[in-house]
Amino acid sequence: MSFIKPGCFLRLLAFVVLASNGFARLSNKRKSYRGYEVLKFAVPSDLDQSFVDYLLNSEWVDVWKYPSLRSRHFDVMVNPQHKDEYKETLHKLGISYRVWISDVQNLIDENASPKQNRRRRNPRIMRLDRYNVYSKILRWMTTFSRTNNDVVSMHQVGTTSHGRRIWALKIGIRSNATKPVFWQDSLIHAREWITGATLLWVANRMVRQYRQGDPEVTTFLNEMDWMFLPVWNVDGYIYTWTTERMWRKSRSGGLGHCRGVDLNRNFDTPNLAEGKTSNFVCSGVYRGTRAFSESESNTVSAYLKTIPLAAFISLHSYAQYWLYPYGFQSNQSLDHFDLERVARKAVKAIYQVNKIKYKHGTVEALAYPVSGGSIDWAHISLCVKYAFGIELRDTGRYGFVLPDRYILPTAREYYQGMKVVAREILEADDLISESCKLN
Ligand SMILES: [Zn+2]
């Protein structure tokens, strides 16, 4: 006599597999990406949905990059156990592919492995041209704000689902007047390490240039307060160092792989189910049970509502895009003309640094349609005219495993783009998005 119906048995089996997966991770064993490949291929638009699901939504594949205006190709990481079967399916479907990265672990080992980081001479000294563990970043931020306490302070702007505090740096020349805040954040997606490294470099650079008497940076710090949130998704970022380098989401709830929420799908925008987002908890772009269901997005957004924003810039990787609203719809923002104009200037300024080309456009047109994103929310709900999402280097050669030798060039480029926005703001008549004025 059986106590378990077949359907129940399968669910129980799935639970045991996922649970054991979860327990394995609790032991803090670092996941190896040995033999993981990144394949590049285009999916025909008329492909049957079941094949699309197999190719893109299976648990053992990880979409690194979706098609965009620049490239029709997906970048997909496939695990070693399934890669032969996967390639065979591609072949049967008549889809040609290229092996873009033949062993992800090799890249991790060569470029940014924690082992390599430990070997460095003085582990207590943080170098801004290297990727750093969270504890080091936090220690650096604390020291940085203490040694520059006339212009720098540290602020808790939120809390993670695991109860960790989320810290931002505030940089500005003290004044009794309330100044507009130039907001920048990074690492809302845990594996996009280049974004946090870039932001820390920029924060440090601005203070150094202010100390050296740079007239433009002095004006910037006089006229505005600058907030830098280098690690938004703290739980996720720590997890990418201890356990799984390619983790993207938060670390809330669930078990094993089927946990966490894509925080940049969790903001309260219209059309929440539209575009590259999912209601499947195991998906890399899972949007959560409702808008602001996650502590990270909920607490930081509540903080953002309390400060007068001059600009809102979120850093991501990778693609080399300077993006602006909207993502959730193809209709243009009423500020489209100004957003486009400033974005064009920014990518031009970036190009002049190292001849690296960034493209500019709306999230929806240049990247892909997506709802629940932070820059749409800032533009719509906080009425911030200049809301940008930047996809930093590269275009896929290294993807998320961008070697640390690219940190300085990437940061220098972004810094010039950022300055374009700051100059615009200082000259602008007002900073409220046009659509907000209608209401
Ligand atoms: Zn991202």
Image: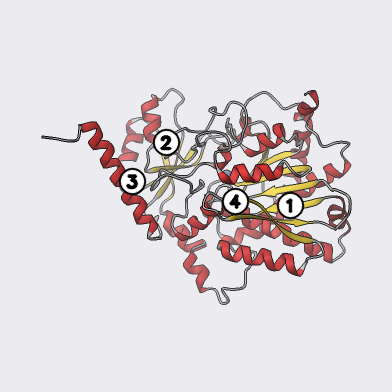
Residue 302 coordinates in the image, percent (x, y): 67, 42
126 lies left or right of 42: right
Q: Residue at x 35, y 54 (%)?
A: 23
| Nearer mark to the viewer, of 2 and 3 | 3
Secondary element under disc 4, as helix, strand or loop, is strand
Compute the Cα span from label 2 to label 1: 37 Å
Q: Quadrant of the rendered structure where residue 266 is?
A: top right
Are circles 2 and 1 on residues that touch, CB within 8 Å? no
Callout 4, which amino acid?
A: Thr
- For label 2, the residue is 56
- For label 4, the residue is 159
Q: Is residue 203 above or below residue 365?
A: below
The mark that comes first in sequence, 3 or 1, is 3
181 lies left or right of 158: right
**Numbered label attached to residue 101:** none
Residue at far bottom of view: 121
**Numbered label attached to residue 18:** 3
Residue 285 coordinates in the image, percent (x, y): 50, 38
The mark that comes first in sequence, 2 or 1, is 2
| Picture mark count | 4
| Nearer mark to the viewer, of 4 and 1 | 4
Compute the Cα span from label 4 to label 2: 32 Å
Q: Residue at x 77, y 61 (%)?
A: 152
Compute the Cα span from label 2 to label 3: 20 Å
Callout 3, which amino acid?
A: Leu
62 lies left or right of 307: left
